[in-house]
Image: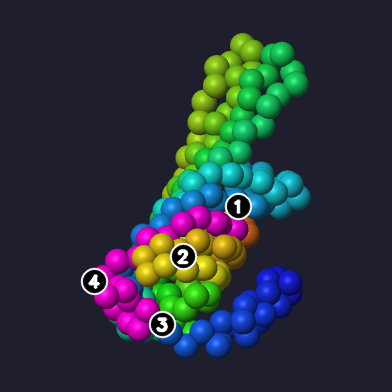
Amino acid sequence: MRRFLGLMGLLLLYSLPAHAQITPKYEIGGGFDFTSFGPQATTTSSTPRLNSFGWNANGAYNLLRIVGVAVDVSGVYNVRKSTNANVGNSSTQIYPFLAGPRFYPLGHRRLTLFGQVLFGQGYIRENVPTVIPFSAGAVTSTGYAWEAGGGVDYSLGDHWAFRMLEVSFLNTHFFGNGQSSERATIGVVYRFGVVGARRRKK
């Protein structure tokens, strides 16, 4: 976390000279999601964290130059392969559905910094392995979820941007217990309804 804050500070200083700004009305994006989920929802707090990989889809409606409303949906997966011939593989799937305010402290620049606090629901499915003579099964749970974090986008033009990094703390509540996770996302963002100093004239 300290390294991330230091990186955000350096990026903030780097972006200050870039005075020209745009303000997109809408943003949509997608990319790769890594979530360190833990502890495992159906076991004790001593269970190792689940490193899960998957996809992320997100969007934003910018109300003002520095304030918007963000939506974030992701799906991450962890498969645990068994070395026992009588026991099948097990897996975990996690899907958070979140929305909330997003803040751009410097607006949209070449490097666009943002922070957000999102709230919503989460869904988890844990696939129980086959244990001869018993067949495989699954357990599921839904519960409230919230997330706090931020990231940085690198503008490739008026409309496209590369999400260099987004990191966040994710809290979920499955199977009657709370879980604390860390997320990291990279991807691409498309902006439309763009106005501002850097908009290309036709």
Mark 3 residue type: Gln
Residue 38 % position (x, y)? 65, 52
Q: Is residue 67 above or below residue 94?
A: below
* Residue projecting furthest to the front: 202
Disc 2 element: loop
- The circle on residue 156 is 2
Viewer-side residue, 155 vs 144:
155
- The circle on residue 21 is 3
The mark that comes first in sequence, 2 or 4, is 2
Disc 3 element: loop
The mark that comes first in sequence, 2 or 3, is 3
Residue 55 % position (x, y)? 49, 47
Identify the magenta region.
184-202
Viewer-side residue, 120 vs 106:
106
- The circle on residue 202 is 4
Mark 1 residue type: Thr
Nearest to viewer (mark 1 / mark 4): 4
Disc 4 element: loop
Give the labeled residue for mark 1: 35
In-image side of 144 versus 3 (left or right):
left
Nearest to viewer (mark 3 / mark 4): 4
147 part of magenta stretch: no
Viewer-side residue, 73 vs 57:
57
Spatial CA span between label 1 and label 4? 43 Å
Mark 4 residue type: Lys
